Image (cartoon, rainbow, N blue to C red):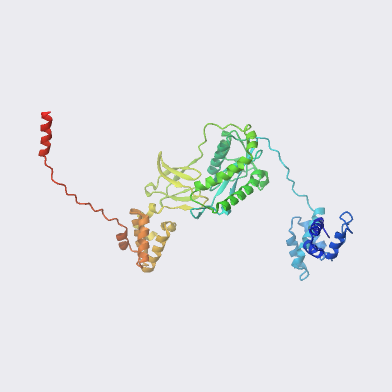
Amino acid sequence: MVTEKQVFILRRLLERGNSISEAARICGISRATARRWAKGEVSMAQKKRRTYRTRANPFEDVWFKVEELLWRCPTLGVAEIFRELCRSYPDRFSRGQLRTLQRQVRAWRAVNGQGKEIFFPQEYPPGKFSQSDVTSMNRLGITIEGKPLRHLYFRLIFPYSNWETGEICFNENLETVCWAVQKCIRRAGGAASEHQADNLPSVVRIGPKGQRVVNPKYRALLEHYGSTPRFTRPHSPHQDGDVERAHGSFKDEIRNALLLRGSCDFSSIEQYQQFLREIEHRRQARVAEAFAREKCFLRPLPEKELHICSYEKVKVSRSSTIRLKGNVYSVHPRLIGLWLTAEVWPDQLVLYVGAQEVDRKRRLVGKGRTDINWRHVIKELLRKPGAFAHYRYREALFPSATLKLAYEKLKEARPTECDVEYLRILHLAHETMLSRVEAGLEALMKAGKVPELSLLKELVQEKAPEVPEVNLPPVDLKSFDSLLTRKEEQ
């Protein structure tokens, strides 16, 4: 069956001087058919639709079974139907006939199949709605000083104008979401009447009667800006259609900008954030006129920002650790047994005893992670070296690859004393400087020596600075008497 596109290409090729044979080959039709169309013996208006098959239907005898499966399981995939036919009728069908079955099932479903879901286009009044969502940026391959940056990007968009802004984040916990929402609203210069987001577990949960229960802190934040929280239905990303579509175009623009830049590596997160801001500003400029109209309808910003953090009470265990938000952090052993107040921010934890700040830590992403500072435990481990071999957080006591390699060398040379010797080396790093200890270990191992403490001390310990001997001539005190004599004469 010759299509209109083939006829159009054929005639263009013939007008350019191509032969009938060459034009037919390019169009994928026979020379005789090409010749008839070139002479004008047939036209698209005269062409009749073919109602007969050009070859035998391989599924004609078993179509009853196909229909039975389609009626019983309306959403069953065609590939699975084909596999079922191959199991029921061995050695009858080949893989090349799957496409034939797909066309026949598609035609059957067009007449007998179930109706599909309808998506209704929406019109958004200016200033009425805003939408937000979080998307993963890991596939972009961003690195900070050569190290992969696993991160998310929170994006807020106003559907009427499609004006958008966003913030880099590393998780979807409550503090991060509230912080990002507030930052984006402040940058926009106003808030919409209603703010819609998907069903993040940290923000909304399903109550015992099936109702949605919004986190009071999230609700209070939106109410502070005069906005009402709304949520999409579970597994219905199309209800956040504007922001979901914007994710794809935003990432495509980032990829193109990275190609032009020639590198995915940045010197700092701040530089990467500035790179994203420049792309964001270009996208905002395209809708600046529409956003200027919408901004007149946004709720004005309150003078003060809300304090986006939460407080939790934690007790320091006998292992000099605390467990907070599903993660384990080490603290100084002098805090063992005390109750601490943890000020939980999106990216950090601030620990207090009463009103006194005692520690500040980077907040871990996710759950089940550990942040053990070897400096907190090294002194006690040196007193109890037998605990080192099976210490739960033993890997945290190898702060660099150099120390790990030194421990392996000690284990080979002195298997019974390697733990004690290594802990003494680590204690030396605690008392002096880790970088100097690493340099000393590298020098010893490069020379083929066992990295023992006695040899390491000679390389690490600072030499006392030499005090130069200063010889001053004796002072003649009688010269001062002459000054007094001159003063009396005057």
The answer to whether residue 22 is seen in the rendering is: yes
Name the spot of residue 389 as percent of width and height, x first.
41, 61
The residue at the far top in this view is 490
Q: Is residue 127 left or right of residue 65?
A: left
Q: Is residue 276 left or right of residue 48?
A: left
Number of marks present in the image shown? 0
Name the spot of residue 344 as percent of width and height, x first.
48, 43
Find residue 440 and report its image quarter. Answer: bottom left
Name the spot of residue 451 as percent of width and height, x first.
35, 64
Give whichever of 170, 337 is nearer the camera: 170
Give whichever of 310, 306 is nearer the camera: 306
Rendered position, 210 above or below 263: above
Q: Is residue 45 left or right of residue 356?
A: right
Quadrant, the N terminus: bottom right
Rendered position, 297 above or below 157: above
Q: Is residue 260 left or right of residue 436?
A: right
The residue at the far bottom in this view is 91
Rendered position, 478 above or below 403: above
Give whichever of 210, 472 is nearer the camera: 472
Give whichever of 286, 220 is nearer the camera: 286
Find residue 338 and report its image quarter. Answer: top left
The answer to whether residue 163 is seen in the rendering is: no
Quadrant, the C terminus: top left
Rendered position, 36 above or below 250: below
Residue at x 82% of width, y 62% of height: 63
Residue at x 53% of width, y 31% of height: 303
